[in-house]
Image: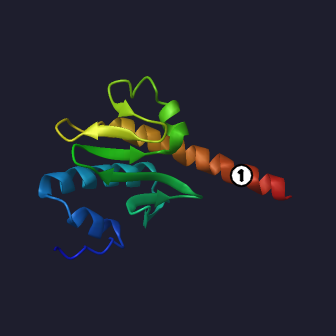
Amino acid sequence: MEAKQAAPSSIDEYIAQFPEDIQQKLQEIRAVIHEAAPEATEKISYQMPTFYLRGNLVHFAAMKNHIGVYPAPSGITAFEKELAGYKTSKGAIQFPLDKPLPLKLVADIVAFRVQENREKALQKKSKKK
């Protein structure tokens, strides 16, 4: 029986557990998210790399045959046309491991989510007054 690996406590630890080719793709996604949301903080949430800015912004994870990106349902709905070639569900996008990552599209989705979280935070503030 194999010893169960401890859940990663950082995105670096999470990425390190995958083969080099998968690590490369995860680092690319991470870099694009950082660029699109420089103020966001990194954490592990739901055992996945997560970027947080006034709430969860986007999660991502490596799966057997794809990289999953989880930008909340609104991030998928807003880019429905652009995502037509990818498998999506209510809150997830699957980017196949055997194809190049659409980094510009990921950046656009993250920028959309940053704006959305900022607007939600402003609405909460104005309701408190």
Q: How many marks?
A: 1
Q: Residue at x 23, y 49 (%)?
A: 25
Above or below, 54 relative to 118: below
How far from the left and from the top, in percent, is residue 2? 17, 73
Look at label 1 and name its amino acid: Leu
Which image quarter: residue 50?
Answer: bottom left
The C terminus sits in image quarter: bottom right
Q: Is residue 6 left or right of residue 35?
A: left
How far from the left and from the top, in percent, is residue 71? 47, 45
Q: Residue at x 16, y 74 (%)?
A: 1
Q: Is residue 101 left or right of residue 52?
A: left
Q: Is residue 82 left or right of residue 67?
A: right
Q: Residue at x 21, y 65 (%)?
A: 17
Task: Find disc 1 in the rendering and name its residue.
Answer: 122
Which image quarter: residue 54?
Answer: bottom right
How far from the left and from the top, in percent, is residue 88? 40, 34
Q: How is the image coloured?
A: rainbow
Q: Residue at x 53, y 56 (%)?
A: 56
Above or below, 64 relative to 93: below
